[in-house]
Image (cartoon, rainbow, N blue to C red):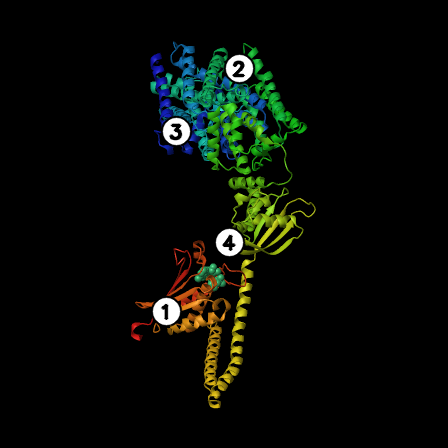
Amino acid sequence: MFSIHALFIAGVSYLLLLFGAAYLTEQGKLPRRLVRHPLVHALSLGIYTSVWTYYGIFGIVQDAGITYLTSYLGATLAFVLAPAIMVPILRIARTHQLSSLADLFSFRFRSGPVGTLTSLLVVAATLPLIAIQIQAVADSLYLLNNDAPRDLIAATFCAVMALFAILFGARHASLRNRNNGLVVAMAVESLVKLVALLTIAGYALFSIFGGPSGLEQWLTDNPAALQRIQHIPENENWNTLLLAFFATTIVMPHMFHLAFTENSSALSLQKASWLMPLYLFLMAITVPIIVWAGIKLEATNVTEYLVLNIGVVLDSRTLTLLAFLGGLSAASGVIIVATVSMASMLQNHLLLPITRVPDNVRFYNWLLWLRRILILVLMSASYLFYTLLARPETLYLLGLIAFISFLQFLPGLLATLFWAGINRWGFVLGLCTGTGCWLLTMLLPMLLDQNISVLDFDINTDDWHQSAVLSLLLNCVVLVVTSRLLPTGEEERKAADACMLNVMQQPMGIRLNATRVEDFEALLRPRFGAETAQRELQSAIAQLGINYEVLSPLDLLRLRTQLEQHLSGLVGPVEAATILEPLDRQDPIEGFRARDVHLLESQLEQYHQRLGGLAAELDELRRYHRLTLQKLPVGVCTLDSDGRILFWNAEIEHYTGLSVDDVLTWRPASLPSPWGELFTRFTEGDQSHLESQKLVVQGQPRWFSLHKAQLNEQKAHAGMVILLEDESDTLMLADKLAHNERLASIGRFAAGVAHEIGNPVTGIACLAQNLKFETESPLVLESGEQILDQTKRISRIVQSLVRFAHTGRQDHSTQHDPVDIYACITEAIQLVSLDTRGRHQRYQNDVPPALQVVGDMQQLLQIFVNLLNNACDASPEQGLISISAEREDEKVIIRMLDEGSGIPAELQDRLFEPFFTTKDPGKGTGLGLALVYNIIEEHYGNIEILSPANKKQNKGTLVVITLPGLPPSEL
Ligand code: ADP
Ligand code: MG
């Protein structure tokens, strides 16, 4: 029907299409959104439908009728359960960079031999599977052209497959990187298969039967045909088959590779959980239609290749070619991906543990070539297997045997996810027992019995079924019993937690022997060479976003974890762990430790989405409590049993200016001054309360009180919780109140004193005046005048004192009257000179006498008194303080210049803050300028303090006040 050339060209063009799809993807020619789309990835899982499903299924229908559905249902079950089984596996595989089933098991059981055993068994079970794919391609070609050189075709096909696997399946040394080309090519293949089957079934339905009603009519006329599909074998083989197909969907290397290794998000698995059942459903419904069409066309002489034969019998080149290409894609998908996956398995678990990287090679290249050579070796082995074993009639049997052998991994896999009690002994012994049983009861008879035929191992006989059930049962029993009897290592227990569902990975309770990045490098260099070691370290550090120069213990620990995961992607989990092992120091401390808690929490942060049920509720509760502590308006910190800081809430961060990341795992003594001393004194002391501790924080005095409590009263070193309360505001408020109170009483006294002084002074003034009438002596008269002058001065002083005392009136209303600045300043100077500090200065009032501003006389007086006081405080003895003023438009600008110390630039921003003072307690209140500021605000004025006023000598302060002057009309 077809010439060899035509078939060859068709096959090659199809494979070229695959190469093209993969190539375009890798070159970035296809839209990224398409390539990365979860649906594309989900579709690539259609690789499940190998030639077993594509061709072999018709053999099953022939033998066992409806049982054929198990192949679809088993897989459907696996995909529907994806969120419960596949997604958790994906999580483990992604987190720990596991690239195959062997990686998963060796990681879970912390054992290299487990990985080796798994790899060997998987390879042993997969080779027959690949052999039947090769055979199917060769057979189908042979069917189309009896002259085709079968073995040559098979060999060529294998070579092309190997080329594809090398080109697109082994692109990156590290398995961290996804081979997008491979995924897209597999998605294309899934589509081709589906389209081929649907087209043929559609053609059969509409052309051969004349539509659904025609088919119905034909079925009524031929009940035997219907019976053939509906027929249910009496034994219960289908249970076992269902289970076997369920297991293979997850465990087969090509499925594992596409579902987990080449997958970056759980989203695609979630999509696959409906897309794949749909896909399989569409595939499954084509089967009966094609079978019936075969019966009608009397094309059933070749059971397995019925799809192909329909086209042949109908003499339709298009249909035949389509069927052939569908078969080709079913075969090639499995072959390519399975070899890629097995190559990485053998690399990690067979070769790397026993080979040393030569010193003079580049590690990544070396690794890639290793994998490529393994692919070639595996492909050759498959070909050999095909030539030795495969005969047309054994296609189905070989497949079945392979599937049952995959079933042996199911107990171990499920236990990995759901039962933390399993240990490596249980796993290995269970697997060996199961596989041994399978070997003895299934494989050996087949290998020994040269005359074996499909009929001997017919699906209707119970032999294989019993053998499968027996081996699985033995596997499970041995697994459980051994795991219970033999001890589990600490390492293994931790790995178990890492794999369990809903159990979060315990942070490793280890300390590191490393303190610097160089320590890590020293470990990696001998194994990978300097360049690779550097690169791996850099990428791990970059991914963590930590600072290369300063690595805290926590960073080191994170770096170690990150590095282990990276290396696991490169050389497998066992190698990675072995390489990094010298880092771990085994001196665990009891109890919860600071970084553990921190790691735990940061992991919970990522994990939180995945929690459900009680765990989610508890996590909510934990968050609530944590938030409460975080937001408590009191500083809280806890120390662990080791005396290291474990918790540091937001308020204490605010008090101390130290962030939690900085202080975590520190001992209090390492905290910077003054906190270090305070905390050490307090934690080591007997007192559980310390009141009003004065600290100078950022140049400001603050008062704190501390409280502590032991976390466990019975045990002496169970850690403690410390509360830190900022009392500064309260204390200062109390101070301020007391001070105000004092001021108010001084005001009252002043009024009283003024009154009391008034009477005697009036008396003295009267007496002095009377002197005029008593004597003529000029000396006495002059003295009288002088006494009068002095009494007047006394009255003036007393009056201004009284006035000032009244400034702090309660009503706060500001009057707006014209105020004579000159007089105001004169009075202020007089008041200031009453004080000792003001007595020894020189004042110079240069204000023009007529200048007036609008304001409240008393309040303005207060301004000038405060400013003069400050100037006196800052000035040396006999310093000159000069005040000048001028009118500018509607404003009056008043300048007060002193020759004092000046104000340092860094303090100038804070001058107007209440309580900001540089003076000793009792001397300054820090309220002066604040008050000035407020008053000037109320007067719609402005104040500026410039210092140093004298730039040359770097001293002196100039205060510039702008106040509204009188409107021109009133001038
Ligand atoms: P107090 O005088 O009670 O300290 P103030 O609010 O009046 O409070 O002043 C705040 C601070 O501003 C003073 O402690 C001082 O350091 C600085 N200061 C104010 N005026 C001057 C000045 N003329 N020269 C130098 N320093 C000044
Ligand atoms: Mg002051």
Q: Quadrant of the N terminus?
A: top left
Ligand 1 under 8 Å from disc 3 Cβ = no
Q: Looking at the image, is mark 1 or mark 3 nearer the viewer?
A: 1
Q: Which mark is residue 213?
A: 3
Which residue has dot 2 on it? Answer: 455
Marks 3 and 2 sit apart, C-alpha to C-alpha, by: 36 Å
Comes first in the chain, label 1 or label 3: 3
Q: What amino acid type should be assigned to the residue bearing mark 1?
A: Asp
Ligand 1 under 8 Å from disc 1 Cβ = no
Q: Which mark is residue 699?
A: 4
Q: Nearer the viewer, residue 700 or 640?
A: 700
C-beta proximity under 8 Å, tags 2 and 4 = no
C-beta proximity under 8 Å, tags 3 and 2 = no
Comes first in the chain, label 4 or label 1: 4
Q: What amino acid type should be assigned to the residue bearing mark 3?
A: Ser
Question: Mark 3: few, some, or many residues within 10 Å (few <14, many ≥20)?
Answer: few
Above or below, 558 relative to 394? below
Q: Which mark is residue 402?
A: none
Marks 4 and 1 sit apart, C-alpha to C-alpha, by: 38 Å
Which residue has dot 1 on it? Answer: 846
